[in-house]
Amino acid sequence: MMCRFRLRSALVAVTSSALYFANLTAAKAVYAHYMVGTTTDAHAQTDIETAAAAGLDGFVLNIGDPRQSYVTSTLSALFAHAPATPSFHLLFSLDLSAALGAGASLSDYDALLAQYKDHASYARGGANDAPFVSTFADGGLTNETWDEWRGRVFDNAVYFVPDFDHTQGYYDAASGWWDYWGGVVDGLFSWEAAWPERAGYGGAYPGDVGPDAPVAAGAEARGKDYMVGLSALQYKDAYSTNLYRAGELNLPERMKNVLEMTPKPEYAEFITWNDGPESHYIGPLWPEQNTDADPARYATQTLAPHTDWLPLIGSFADAFRANASSASAMRPSPSSNAATGALWYKAILQSASCPNEGNGGVYAKPDGWDTGEDVLNWAVVVGEGSDGWKARLVSGGEEIGSVDLVEGMNYGKVEGLKAGAQRLEVVDGDGKVVRVAAGGRCVSDGCPDGIYNMNPQVVGLADDGNDGNC
């Protein structure tokens, strides 16, 4: 009798626990930051379908100047197509930096928020399932201004998770910061933490979650949520800016560290889906989005597609939503693949000398150039039954590395990048090549783009055995 009672109690406890963790899992989501610009209806539809197929839960829609006609038309297209994928949701990120710089104000967002906040495809969050709103920057606005905005637009029924990381005391989770801002926010998002340090913001090394940790802990201690940012790199050589923030292993290292975070973030946001000029796009770049000459030197879908990062991101998203605490829990995405992953590298060597460097501007070495490395970067996710598998790296026709694989996500960088074709092979225990990443642009021993182009080539694993010619 005692045993039966204990068994029933255990079953009830297990069932309750399963429901509890199911609720936790359901609450977690992985988004991509989406720059709202000129986009055709067909491309808006493709973006949603591609992101959803990759395992993302939605887009965080960056709206700069809300008064622009392209904002109206692109939002209309996105919200028209999102209902076809009921699990995919959209939310607004108010880009106060761009908006205020263009002469707009916080109130200029009111009409768009009123129009879409109750849409079936608008994301909701928090205990009250309220419309989810984020920001890029704080706009220099006061807590009183934001508090008034909450009441004016939402009657305080809003789930507000802004990027306020340039406000004093933010990254220290200072008690004074929380005294001032705590009544305004429902959660926090740290944009600058996604990359290594620059100008006093960012991690100590690629993939570092050190800046996130105190912010996330401070939020949890006050019953608030945290959205963590992830990004592959930041390289920009346009609009009077020339900078590079690694890069290399920033993406997989941060994936690993995010999964190991305590407390665990409720949300993850990939920066970005489609910001070509910043080079951290993971979705397709459409020709109508940017026709300017400077970014076209390094960021087009033809020159440097990045969509082959999506299967790796999908693998992370599955693990994140499942509340996994280690990258060893990651599995190939889609599960039908024997291995998921990618190879990425820059097509210019650190020894390069570009002929117009003396002219400065876009032709100069970017700020951060010296942090670049002549390496092949790679990440491979394998599942059960992969004992004895290896990742083999080939550069310029020469094998430069071989690494034993284990279940979950494996990643690394191999020195010895050479001019010519680059290749990643996944080899099983019998020596058979299972999947190959090859066919990206050749590494040059010169200056092929006329600039110090740090935007990487990204080549995904495939079954077709590409010979790697370029």
Image: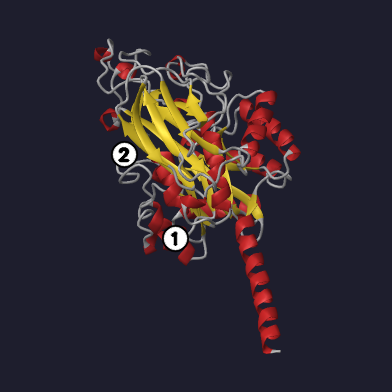
Q: Which residue is mark 2?
A: 198
Residue 202 x %, y %:
35, 44
Above or below residue 123? Residue 464 is above
Q: Which mark is residue 235?
A: none
Above or below residue 448? Residue 413 is below
Q: Residue at the spot x=28%, y=22% of the render?
A: 365
Above or below residue 320? Residue 106 is above
Depth check: give the residue in front, 118 or 82.
82
Depth check: give the residue in front, 51 or 338.
338
Residue 214 x %, y %:
38, 58
Q: Residue at the spot x=44%, y=60% of the render?
A: 262
Residue 99 x %, y %:
51, 35
Figure quadrant of the N terminus: bottom right
Q: Residue at the spot x=30%, y=15% of the render?
A: 445
Furthest-top residue in this view = 355
Tag in front: 2 or 1: 1
Above or below residue 238? Residue 197 is below
Q: Amino acid at mark 2?
A: Arg
Disc 2 element: loop
Residue 331 shown left or right of residue 251 in the figure: right
Instruction: Give residue 360's quadrant in the image.
Output: top left
How far, Cα to Cα, is label 2 from label 1? 25 Å
Furthest-bottom residue in this view = 1
Residue 348 can be seen, yes or no:
yes
Q: Which residue is mark 1?
A: 262
Q: Amino acid at mark 1?
A: Thr
First in residue order: circle 2 vs circle 1: 2
Figure quadrant of the C terminus: top left
Q: What colouring does the structure picture have?
A: secondary structure
Depth check: give the residue in front, 150 or 190.
190
